[in-house]
Image (cartoon, rainbow, N blue to C red):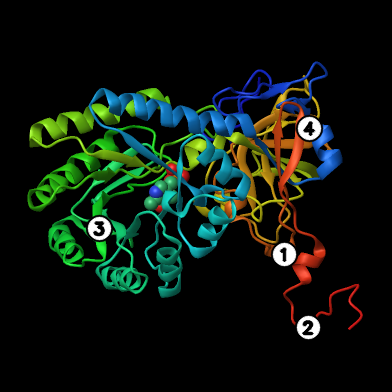
Amino acid sequence: MFANPLAPEWLEAPAEANSLASTVWSRNAARSESGELTIAGVSASELVASFGTPLYVVDEADAVARATEIKGAFDTEFARIGSSVKVYYAGKAFLCTEVARWMTAVGLNIDVASAGEMAVALAAGVDASRLGFHGNNKSLSEIDRAVRAGIGPIVIDSVVEIGRVAEAAARHGRTQRVRLRINSGVHASTHEYLATAREDQKFGVPLTEAEAIVAQIRSHSSLEFVGIHSHIGSQIFDTAGFAEAARRLLELHARLSVAAPVPELNLGGGFGIAYTSADQALPVAELAASLANIVEAECARLEIPVPVIAIEPGRSIIGPSTTTLYTAGTIKDVLVDGEAVRKYVSVDGGMSDNLRTALYAADYSARLANRVSDAAPELVRIAGKHCEAGDIVVRAEYLPGDVEPGDIVAVPATGAYGWAMSNNYNYLARPPVVAVRDGKARIIVRGETENDLLSRDAGITPSGDSE
Ligand SMILES: *Cc1c(COP(=O)(O)O)cnc(C)c1O
């Protein structure tokens, strides 16, 4: 087959461009006998006929299974070393009441990072004590609401927050559990990690100042210090970064344990997933075993008991569960540098429903969803419909060369930071989210209507209103 020189090195020209890589697609994605993409038994064309495009399709059983497996693997591995684990689902990846219920039903807690996220979790009926609260700039009113609601641990991110949380707790007659976020100096980028004295970013307090800051926290009778926290980054594929962060944190944890016991250590989230068939995510059992081994060895070396470990995965639970369906509109062959052709397939969404490609140059993959084709694979770029050259959904992929307007294009692994970062650029309406399970589809977040888009413009009288 023809390998297009415009293709990135990691993308191999395939013999056919119909297969669904099991590492990338949600578990219940398959091809029907006629060749259509089906998810949990519902075909792409049925979904599109009922709900239109763009459409986020969540494979419910896949999301629940990943949550269950992460919790199970960490429970097993940390029980083996005489400890236990609290798993917090990082709600910022994708939160709605339905997802909050799926997560808590299988024993996870939920992390929120704003009053809005907290409101969603509470509206789902999640007990406030099962919520962790993050953020480098929580407002006074957010802190007040959280404390009043009886929220679980608040992750203090700066010295100034200590007094703010302590006062809110005193005001509401509560003892507020808090963690302290540490800037461990370890930064994990996708395939490597860097360890410095202090990473140049906004989150947390420096390792070197942590002891004095914890002493300040402990001086407030309205605060209970639960332990330190660190989140070294996202979409991490190996455990070297976690290992280095765990070593640094456990040394601090041991020093802090001299004055008074420190019950927990929070290692954050950031476990990577496969967006394309070139990505190899670490199996969750291996990840859990490797983290448990690191923690066990370090605690033995420091002669301290193994603390209760908290982790905060978001992407690795919800990311692979979701597929976005689009309709192909216009198609152009663009001759690049007079040498090679890049086929631009434009779809009916883009950076408003998936910002990650424009924001991080993230890579995704894609397949035709309404049919298979034995046409020779051609290199395509899947672009959105926004007025921005960087409005790309999939930077490079091979699709059957006979892709045509009207085809349904499916982009897998869009569950994390897809809907969550969606926006109304160019006044596009945010698409609905549909959960599929056992051959049935139901809306879990409705799509926006044109009236939704106009409703906040003070100069527009809502249609149908007689005023
Ligand atoms: C974003 C974030 C997470 C989750 O990261 P994922 O890559 O989705 O697993 C966990 N903890 C903190 C503090 C975060 O900011």
Specify the quadrant of the image occupied by residue 426.
Answer: bottom right
Residue at the disc numbered 4 = 44
Q: Nearer the viewer, residue 183 or 317?
A: 317
Residue at x 39% of width, y 23% of height: 285
Q: Are marks 1 and 3 in contact (CB under 8 Å)?
A: no
Q: Residues within 10 Å of mark 2 (few under 14, many from 20)?
A: few
Residue at x 72% of width, y 74% of height: 456
Q: Label 1: state its secondary structure.
A: helix
* Residue 440 x, y percent position in the rendering: 77, 31
Which amino acid type corresponds to the residue marked 3 in the rendered image?
A: Glu
Dot placed on the residue nearer the N-terminal end, 1 or 2: 1
Residue at the disc numbered 3 = 224
Q: Which mark is residue 459?
A: 2
Dot placed on the residue nearer the N-terminal end, 2 or 4: 4
The quarter in which the C terminus is drawn is bottom right
| C-alpha gap between disc 3 and disc 4 | 51 Å
Specify the quadrant of the image occupied by residue 297.
Answer: top left
In the picture provided, is 177 more to the left or to the right than 142? left
Residue at x 35% of width, y 54% of height: 153
* Residue 178 x, y percent position in the rendering: 29, 57
Dot placed on the residue nearer the N-terminal end, 3 or 4: 4
| C-alpha gap between disc 2 and disc 4 | 39 Å
Which amino acid type corresponds to the residue marked 2 in the rendered image?
A: Gly
Residue at the disc numbered 1 = 426
Dot placed on the residue nearer the N-terminal end, 1 or 4: 4
Q: Are marks 1 and 4 in contact (CB under 8 Å)?
A: no
Q: Identify whether 21 is placed above or below 422.
A: above
Which amino acid type corresponds to the residue marked 1 in the rendered image?
A: Asn
Q: Label 4: state its secondary structure.
A: helix
